[in-house]
Amino acid sequence: MNKDTIYKISTITLFLFSFSPFAIPKDSLLRAENLTDGETLVSPKSVFELGFFSSGSSRKRFMGVWFTVSPDTVVWVANRDSPLNNTSGTLTLNKRGSIMLYDSTGRTVWSSSSNSSSDANNFSPILELNDSGNLILKDQMSNSIIWQSFDHPTNTLLPGMKIGKNFRTGFETYLSSWKSSDDPSEGNYRYEMDTEGVPEIITWDRSQIISRTGIWNGEYFSAAPQMLTYKDMLNFIFVWDQDEVSYGFEAKSNSTLTRLVLNETGISQRFFWDQPHQTWNLFWSKSKDECSQYARCGPFSICQRTDMQACSCLRGFEPLTPTEWYMRNTSGGCKRMVPLGCSANSDGFYVIEGVEVPYSHNATADASISVKECKRRCLMNCSCMAYAPLDIRGQGSGCVMWQTVLTDTKNIGGQQVLYVKVSKSELGTNHRKRRAVIIGIISGSIIFVLLISSIVYLLWRKKMRYTKQAISSTRGKSLEHSERNELFQGTDLPVFDMDMILQATDSFSNTNKLGEGGFAIVYKGQLPCGQEIAVKRLSRESHQGLNEFMNEVLLVAKLQHRNLVRLLGCCIDDNERVLIYEFMANKSLDFYIFDATRRASLNWTTRLEIIIGIARGLLYLHQDSRFNVIHMDLKAANVLLDEQMNPKIADFGIARLFNREQGVINTKTLVGTRGYMPPEYLSEGVISVKSDVYSFGVLVLEIISGKKNRGNQNLLAYAWELWEEGNIIKLLDDVIECPAFATELMRYVHVGLLCVQEFPNDRPFMSSVFTMLSSDTLLQDPKKPLVGTRIGGFTSDGSFYQNDSSSVVSVDHLTITAIEGR
């Protein structure tokens, strides 16, 4: 073997060795040293490693810590929101005592932002990885810690770590999810200590609570009694004093590898390492069931997973809105039946065992008093709704009192108890007697109602047989007042015979299907006289479908406008609920504008006429009709086009009536379509006419651009960026020739941006919108909509592409992508 061959082999060996994860089997890094891609730091007992990694199929590189036995299990990431584009990253320490991560150009990708106050001459930083997985930067001279990764968690809680808040410094630690299973950048979910009231850990989806742990009761968090099953393996540590509130855990055996993870869907999970099988075992995962949704049953109620109907009112309370409650819309919760008297003589308590106590945001605690004293204080406090022992061990001690309202109470088992304050008339013998009387009254009423209902049903069947014979064979005509079904009295709406509907649609043949939504299927039909109709057949099983049916019948039948689709009639036959509309030959707007070929048929003039027509229809709903109506689901799919391409707003299933004095409506039940919902509706459940204005603004930008607004607000971000650049012509659909109408384009985009401003008060009313679109009035400058920076662009067919180098500004107080379209 000659000298050159030996040199080549040595070079190849050195190259391969330099990129081996075992190339540097050491646990520390000094200031004069670098850590490059392919090299790792290994903790003293080889439990953890620090190095560069890629996730999934991505080539982007991140600096992180992982378990040595499971390299794919990354527990901490340094540059999670600033990935490296290649393998040229370098980790080093600077003179000021900071950890620095550089890319190939010397640009700082990430740093610990830690600065030592020590004299540089007497300062000797060292970076160490210990067997707990903690990456520690400290001064060798003083042995003091300058920075540590345990103070900056990502999505994983390890033994020895803690989450919580330091009251003296205000510093908080919390978990934040990955964006996806193979993207470690920060996602939407946070797992953090709520320090208002009595502390508990909350899982947030932006500003929305999705789950919580309940208060710490000395043994476990009240919402997690399964923590008791880990006693042989883990010690749980909860600290709450004047200095801090924090939660963490320790493994009882050094050989126990465990982790708590907030995954990319917002679910917290606990894993243990199965050494014999070399795999992770999932021991616990926060369930998603009837009761997992926060405040699902509303105030003063309790959710029980084992019941067929999960929600029920607490004893002494009744549904706030009975009709909605029995239709399974329980978000309004319950109200007290007998007022409290605020004294020991008039009020008392009943106990709920095995409970997840209510949300503690409005609770107070005192660890120094007995449970007996807690009861006395709650009785004397008129705003106290319930109490519980702060510590359940032994006979119980300490006191937690809930003020004003009880929210998100659940029956889940375990040892936690809750004492709910009610009038004494709701307790003991009096309560049982009262309950027996009520049951007797209810039973008698039910029998009476059933008897009357049977008689009414027989009369109704007889009347319907007569009605069917009276209906014209060519189209349904209005029944005489004396013959009209009571359900439709006052609507002047023709009632069609089901046999006629079946004949018109060929028994709801799939060949006649025009479209399908969440609660209904629409079919094309033809009456014997030749008139074409659109037949909307609502789901038999859906309670929401029944609500939508009644909403449309009682509302749309009273609305008449050239830009609203016309309801011709309806039909109820056993479980069938059918609406008959005028047939729209050109289907819906989304059939055209989001199709690469068909949208070419929509020239500039046609698009403007469609926008004006929609605006005219909305103005009628908001201001000019007999009712004031908020549509609530304005989108391209709900704008139908007739033979002349005139737009008509359709689908009033979730529309809401309002009065102008009321201004806004609050709701806890969010329905609609992502991308069209305004921020205040998503974050606070606030509805107003400005909700429709926001949807209209989105629709204007979609019609102009031919691009669909995704739930993550891509189109709005794109339009705003072009607006700021003064390059709005680029937003125009590329199937339209370079326009001689640039001024008109600018005005319509300008109005669209005014409509999608973040705050409702900044958006114009539809009366102003219509004026701005149809005249040359001076327009004020729009404010930036609630979007991030653009994360990509659009191809010629309207699809979105991702830019690797761009980022999205987080929106901390909204949940935008959690709502599914109808």
Image: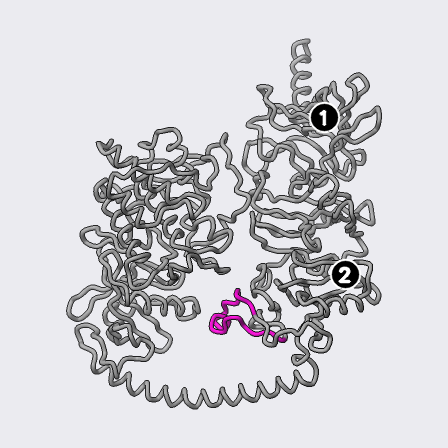
x and y, in percent, of residue 367 in the image = 80, 58
Part of the protein shown in magenta: 316-334
The one nearer the camera, 450 or 765, is 765
Q: What residue type is labelled 1?
A: Asn
Distance between the Cα atoms at labels 2 and 1?
A: 41 Å
Quadrant position of the N terminus in the picture: top right
Q: Which residue lies furthest to the top in this view?
A: 3
Is residue 135 shown above or below 505?
Answer: above
Q: Residue 390 carries which label?
A: 2
Tell me the SS state at disc 2.
loop
x and y, in percent, of residue 232 in the image = 81, 56
Q: Which amino acid does label 2 sit on?
A: Leu
Is residue 792 shown above or below 583?
Answer: above
Tell me the SS state at disc 1.
loop
The one nearer the camera, 804 or 483, is 483
Callout 1 crowding tier (Cα within 10 Å): few <14, some 14–19, many ≥20:
some
Is residue 246 shown above or below 288?
Answer: above
Res. 25 image quadrant: top right
Residue found 61% across the figure and 24% down from its top: 108
x and y, in percent, of residue 589 in the image = 29, 50
Residue found 68% across the figure and 65% down from its top: 384
**Residue 326 magenta-highlighted:** yes
Q: Mark 2 or mark 1: which comes first in sequence?
A: 1
Is residue 293 shown above or below 800?
Answer: below
The reply, left or right, for residue 182 in relation to residue 452 is: right
Q: Which mark is residue 115?
A: 1
Quadrant position of the C terminus in the picture: bottom left
Q: Residue 760 carries which label?
A: none
- Is residue 378 at all visible to an observer of this figure? yes
Callout 2 crowding tier (Cα within 10 Å): few <14, some 14–19, many ≥20:
many
